[in-house]
Amino acid sequence: MELLQLQYFLSVARLEHVTEAARNLHVTQSSLSKTIQRLEEDLGVPLFDRIGRNLRLNEFGCRFLRRAERALFELEQGKQEINDLSSPEQGTLELAVTTASRLPNILREFRKKQPNIQFHVQMLTTQEMVTLLYRGEVDYCLSSPPVQGDDIECQIVFVDPILVAVPKDHRLADRSSVSLTELKDEWFVGVKKGYGTRDLVDSICKSAGFAPKYVYEGDEPARLSSLVEAEIGIAFIPSTARNSRENIKYLQVENHELVREIALLWHRSRYISRAALEFREVVIQYFESISQKTTQTCCTTNSESICGPKQA
């Protein structure tokens, strides 16, 4: 059994399509088919059921897939550990995020400490992120909501209030807060289903007796502020993604605990390089500083509401 056979098998097993797998592997379809056939001959059993031009993993294939993924996972961890020992100041951090509003600031802080470490960042839905996490293909995930699993370490780093963003000329723009029921007839702009904040908001609104009506659903959260400013619709936007645009007013939500938890995730068995360990510390310290600033702001606001505004 050859390493190349395992790599080819994993690609075909995940896609269940030889043509697409061959394209991703940059090999000919015939070469890929022959390699899979030799692997099946070595094992003495078929790994796929052939249905016309389509393939489906059979019971043998499903069981072997778990073992093959584990074997290649361990080999990849060994490779990363050797690279880290030989070149600790070099390398690439693999990151997956469902929430990216604060990521540029985090990466900026980390780059001050590790200027030679590169990044590869993917913006994904929760399910896509979890898939890469279980495969051990990413160092860390920054996720909302948190994800629990047998092989997943999950550390909540921030509790982020979700606000309602409205245009400056909106009927609610002179308010500081709003109840969910007052929003039932509004048109919203938001991200697609599958993103943690969207799923959370839809669930909370359902408990309040309505389903938000979306005029726009996308996969770029940063675009929502521009759409609100253009009066396309209003939006639920986490406080950490709040934009300082003058043409948008942010309202707190009354009578519902509308918050999202931001968590840092990593695979329990994945090798963690020195740079990755330092990145984790930067993330934790960054959100701790935000929490402290938020607490100070709340204390100042509460003091003024009780004692009146401070005199100049």
Image: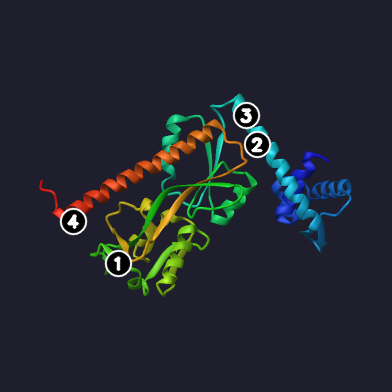
Q: Quadrant of the N terminus?
A: top right
**Is residue 213 something one can see in this rendering?**
no
Instruction: Report if the CB atoms under discs 2 and 3 are less than 8 Å apart.
Output: no
Marked residue nearer the N-terminal end (2 or 3): 2
Q: In the image, which disc is placed on residue 83?
A: 3
Q: Name the element at disc 3.
A: helix
Q: Earlier in the sequence, mark 3 or mark 4?
A: 3
Label at residue 77: 2
Upstream in sequence: badge 1 or badge 4: 1
Q: Of callouts 1 and 2, which one flags the residue occurring earlier in the amino acid sequence?
A: 2
Taking the spot 48% from the left edge, 63% from the top edge, the residue there is 199
Residue nearer the viewer, 179 or 4: 179
Which residue type does callout 1 highlight? Val
Asked whether residue 200 appears in the rendered view, the answer is yes
Dot 4 alpha-carbon crowd within 10 angstroms: few under 14, some 14 to 19, many 20 or more: few
Instruction: Compute the Cα span from label 1 to label 4.
Output: 18 Å
Q: Amino acid at mark 3?
A: Asn
Secondary structure type for disc 1: strand
Helix, strand or loop for disc 4? helix
The tally of labels here is 4
Provide the secondary structure element on which disc 2 rests: helix
Q: Residues within 10 Å of mark 1 (few under 14, many from 20)?
A: some
Q: Which percent across, then down, holds residue 160?
A: 39, 53
For the residues bearing labels 1 and 2, Cβ distance under 8 angstroms: no
Label 1: which residue?
A: 178
